[in-house]
Image (cartoon, rainbow, N blue to C red):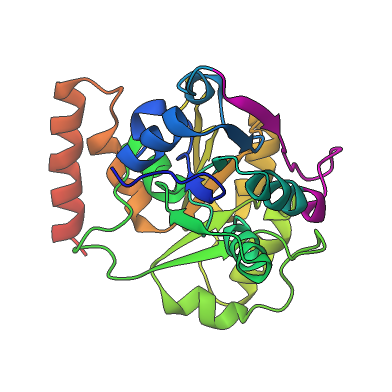
Amino acid sequence: MPPFEPGSVWLVGAGPGDPGLLSLLAFHALGEADDIVYDALVGEGILALAGTGAVLHHAGKRGGKPSAKQADITEKLIELARSGRKVLRLKGGDPFIFGRGGEEALALAAAGVPFRLVPGITAAVAGLAYAGIPITDRRVNSAVTFITGHESGGGPPEGLDWPALATGAPVLILYMALKHLAWMAERLIDAGLSPDTAVVLISKATTQDQHILETHLAAAAADAEAAGIEAPAIVAIGDVVDLRAALDPGATPEARARAVLQLGDSRKNE
């Protein structure tokens, strides 16, 4: 493992929740850091891996709730590093996919603070896999589009090219989209995506509280509300969702085998 030098900051992805999904670099950093500045999506099971004597600093940012200001978080990282500490900035998922990791790295660069970037497994990949859905399948899709569910001010992502999104990739992944899901679904349908397109919502992916809801595009927002789906949640739209029947970790081997046969029959009829 590379040395964690005093006076430096490691910007590290902790993955979506399951401690088993930590990278070796993330595990190494947890054991070496003097200070761990962590966000709201980093669970206790991961923080329990911190080294003896490490100081934990909560710096969670959650939409609609009292949160640490980004400028204050960045200033803390710089201040701790300049005092000679080994500083771990630990963020849920991958900090560089809609996670402000790039912003924090740029601030450290401007301040002359040494840093290392360590990506994490993003919720779109891990959450779908834990639900029994491969994010790509060569018979279904050769492209995936990641879309943020809100702009920097918290409003819906109005500046996107919705016709291009509706036709550009067979699978769409929405991050942080619960609040504006009805609005986004309407834009996609107006842009030509079928209202019956398969959708899966995965709340608190890879954790013991994981909640999975299968539905279709036109009903996704209403069904999510009725089912009590809570943030953080990932939303996947497209035919790969249909593969879950054959790959669901909770299904019996017999049910999976039947689902594989049904998938084969349905593809022959297309």
Magenta span of residues: 53-72
Image quadrant where residue 249 sits: top left
What x and y, as percent, mark residue 57? 69, 31
Q: Residue at image x 76%, y 52%?
A: 75
Q: Residue at image x 49%, y 64%?
A: 146
- Whether residue 41 appears in this view of the structure is no
Q: Assign the magenta stretch its main secondary structure.
A: loop
| Vertical arrangement, residue 258 with respect to residue 235, above or below | above
Q: Left or right? Give the position of 57 relative to 249.
A: right
The residue nearer to you, when weighing 117 against 232, is 117
Q: Left or right? Give the position of 171 relative to 181.
A: left
- Whether residue 174 appears in this view of the structure is yes
What x and y, as percent, mark residue 90? 55, 41
Q: Quadrant of the C terminus?
A: bottom left
What x and y, as percent, mark residue 123? 46, 45
Q: Left or right? Give the position of 42 relative to 243.
A: right
Q: Left or right? Give the position of 57 relative to 10.
A: right
